[in-house]
Image (cartoon, rainbow, N blue to C red):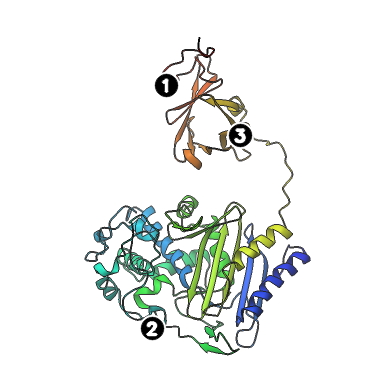
Amino acid sequence: MVTSLLPSTQRVLLRRLAVEQSENRVPSLIAGLVRDGETVWFDSRGQVNEAPSTTDTQYRIGSITKTFVGVLVMRLRDEGRLDLADKLDEYLPGTSLGNRSIGEILSQCSGLTAEPAGQWWERTPGGSPEELLASIDDGALRPTPRHQFHYSNVGFGILGELVARLRGAPWHEVMEREILRPLGMRRTTLSPVAPHAEGFAVHPWADVVLPEPAEDAGAMAPAGQLWSTYDDMARWARFVLGDTGEVLHPDTVAEMRVPGSVDDGPEWRSGYGLGFQLLRHNGRRLAGHSGSMPGFLASVWADPAENEAVIFMANTTAGVTGALGTDLLDALAEHDPRIPEPWIPRPDMDMGLLELTGEWYWGPSPHVLRVLSNGLLDLRLGHGRRGRASRFRPNGDGTWTGLDGYYAGEILRIGRDADGMPNHLNLNTFIFTRTPYASDAPVPGGVAGWRPAGS
């Protein structure tokens, strides 16, 4: 595949992939990196049907399936068909989970059991949605706080049925119509379509393999049944990064990447948004999902800040280390870092914004307001100090809306003196002035004037 990376970088990436496949005895392993919407590197090791796998070889992607279900739910939300605060009983009555919200189930903090009742669902034929819902009794709830992260495959079986009930068609048909076709993902399917890999378990103490079954999971299919290819997963990574086509508004996808629950270990490294797994690594904030089914492992991780993503797929039950994806991203950053574009003055700058720039004070604390190259305003603590920082988007009526940070969603209004010059910023009752507690601005509580201590 054509790549824009340095040959030395390609060799570093290939070696990392080759070591993973060889030392962990993976029958076949493929991986690639996406930067700025294009695959900049792809390679594979091992064989599928006595030939190297390609970008068109299908692998089972396991729980990456959940991200598609999450998008279907968010489409219903954006259409006004449901609200994330709605209780499950409003749509699927009769389960012990009925008082939990759609948002809690979607962000893995409903307290629902991880696995369905009965045999190991990933290796046995699945039952009907009615059977799944009937099995969710009091024993299916775990004694964890409602707001605590607890991963549940069952929850996504429920969400798949929720989509089916509201759309009047099986969830996978809805997915095909509403996601896969619009995005051109023709090789993502519920069952394998050749060319595809066979799933294996590798013996821990000998170089032999055991074929794994690939049963239809029935009502649990929304938790992990899909098959896909590298090419389709690269398109899905671009979707997670914000290249959403007409499927969802990019703001909705950004909402899905916001933590709804966190896996509270020694440090906050992983969590869950609205259908997306989240991971923090070396300053990166990654969104996507890992996938595991008998005979297969896969991952898609996207970094919106860098507009980069990593994908890997393997046909083994266990053995691929969780660090493979982040190691490949680290190698890309180290050996082929971005070269910044040359800075040039903005030709279409709204010169009226210049009067807003510079230093403002919230109480005695200095802040700096500047205009970004994309026309947004950026407000943050001055003098290199760390603290609250937000960007603001114009609303067209002289006000601005916060996009991120502490002031996300809050309205910034520009206050002016009798001559029309900006003399204060009103940010959700916080008043910023040109000098600390300026007397010509409506500072709450009034301003008595500065004086020496003790006077």
Query: Going from the N terminus, do you reach mark 2 or mark 3 first?
Result: 2
Rendering coords of residue 197 (x, y %): 55, 82
Rendering coords of residue 270 (x, y %): 50, 59
In the image as oriented, which residue stretches furthest toward the right? 7
Q: Nearer the viewer, residue 25 or 98?
A: 25
**Separation of disc 2 and disc 3 at Cα?**
58 Å
Horizontal arrangement in the rendering, residue 165 relative to residue 288 (left or right)? left
Which residue sits at x=72%, y=66%? 3
Query: Going from the N terminus, do you reach mark 1 or mark 2 first?
Result: 2
For label 3, the residue is 371
Horizontal arrangement in the rendering, residue 353 relative to residue 175 (left or right)? right
For label 2, the residue is 124
Residue 403 visible within the image: no
In the image as oriented, which residue stretches furthest toward the left? 94
Q: Nearer the viewer, residue 384 or 373?
A: 384
Element at label 3 = strand
Look at label 3 and name its amino acid.
Val
Image quarter of the N terminus: bottom right
- Image-quadrant location for residue 66: bottom left
Look at label 1 and name its amino acid.
Pro
Viewer-side label of 2, 3: 2
For label 1, the residue is 444
